[in-house]
Image: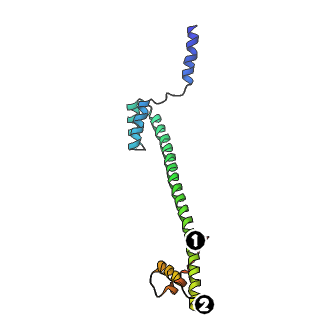
């Protein structure tokens, strides 16, 4: 009867997958992988001997580790690029809003200058202070306003 109980155990062990790596073997392989991600055949044979593994086990472990390492690196790069994109997108939206606000101010100032030039309405002290705060004392303010109003709107699309 004992022999019949031992037989399934023997059959079971024959059908099992090869032994998994021990913690010590994994630590050693990880340490080696940090130094070099690809192994020369002689180095692979040496590691296999040192860790009591088959060279094929070492080769497959390194192949799998490289695949996981590459996936992790790609994921980290994606996360970094995504956060950079999000920050740039926010900055771009802020700049578009600021540009729109400045265009409104520019049109208002142009209208005031045109009215002043046509003699309809004089520039009051508030207008003068606002213009000066934007551009400082400048005889060519009218020219500046005309030039700024012709800036292309390529970033609005």
**Residue occupying the far right of the picture:** 157
Residue drawn at x 58%, y 73% as measured from the top left:
154
Viewer-nearest of discs 1 and 2: 2
- Tell me where residue 101 appears, x and y as whole percent: 57, 72
Callout 1 secondary element:
helix
Answer with mark 1 or mark 2, whichever residue precedes in sequence.
2
Residue beneath disc 1: 155
Viewer-side residue, 123 vs 114: 123
Callout 2 secondary element:
loop
- Tell me where residue 51 appears, x and y as whole percent: 40, 31
- Tell me where residue 96 appears, x and y as whole percent: 57, 69
Q: Are marks 1 and 2 in contact (CB under 8 Å)?
A: no
Viewer-side residue, 138 vs 10: 138
Q: Residue 123 lies in what quarter of the image? A: bottom right
Which label was assigned to residue 42? none
Q: Please determine whether, in this image, residue 39 is positioned above or below residue 93.
A: above
- Measured in 3D between alpha carbons, the distance from the residue under mark 1 to the one under mark 2, in whole angstroms, is 35 Å
Q: Please determine whether, in this image, residue 92 is positioned above or below residue 44.
A: below
Q: Residue 45 lies in what quarter of the image? A: top left
**Residue occupying the far front of the picture:** 125
Residue drawn at x 54%, y 68% as measured from the top left:
95
The answer to whether residue 62 is visible is yes
Q: Residue 9 lies in what quarter of the image? A: top right
The 10 Å Cα crowd at callout 1, few under 14, some 14 to 19, many 20 or more, is few
Quarter in which the N terminus is drawn: top right
Viewer-side residue, 108 vs 15: 108
The 10 Å Cα crowd at callout 2, few under 14, some 14 to 19, many 20 or more, is few
Residue beneath disc 2: 120
């Amino acid at each position: 009867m004992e022999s019949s109980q031992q037989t399934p155990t023997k059959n079971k062990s024959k059908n099992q997958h090869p032994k998994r790596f021990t913690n010590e073997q994994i630590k050693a392989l990880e340490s080696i992988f940090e130094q070099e991600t690809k192994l020369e055949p002689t180095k692979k044979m040496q590691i296999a001997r040192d860790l009591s593994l088959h060279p094929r086990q070492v080769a497959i472990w390194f192949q799998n580790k490289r695949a996981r390492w590459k996936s992790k690196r790609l994921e980290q790069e994606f996360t970094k690029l995504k956060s950079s994109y999000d920050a740039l997108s926010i900055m771009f939206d802020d700049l578009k809003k600021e540009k729109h606000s400045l265009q409104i101010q520019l049109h208002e100032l142009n209208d005031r200058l045109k009215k002043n030039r046509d003699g309809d309405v004089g520039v009051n002290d508030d207008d003068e202070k606002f213009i000066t705060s934007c551009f400082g004392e400048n005889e060519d303010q009218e020219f500046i306003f005309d030039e700024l109003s012709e800036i292309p709107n390529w970033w609005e699309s």
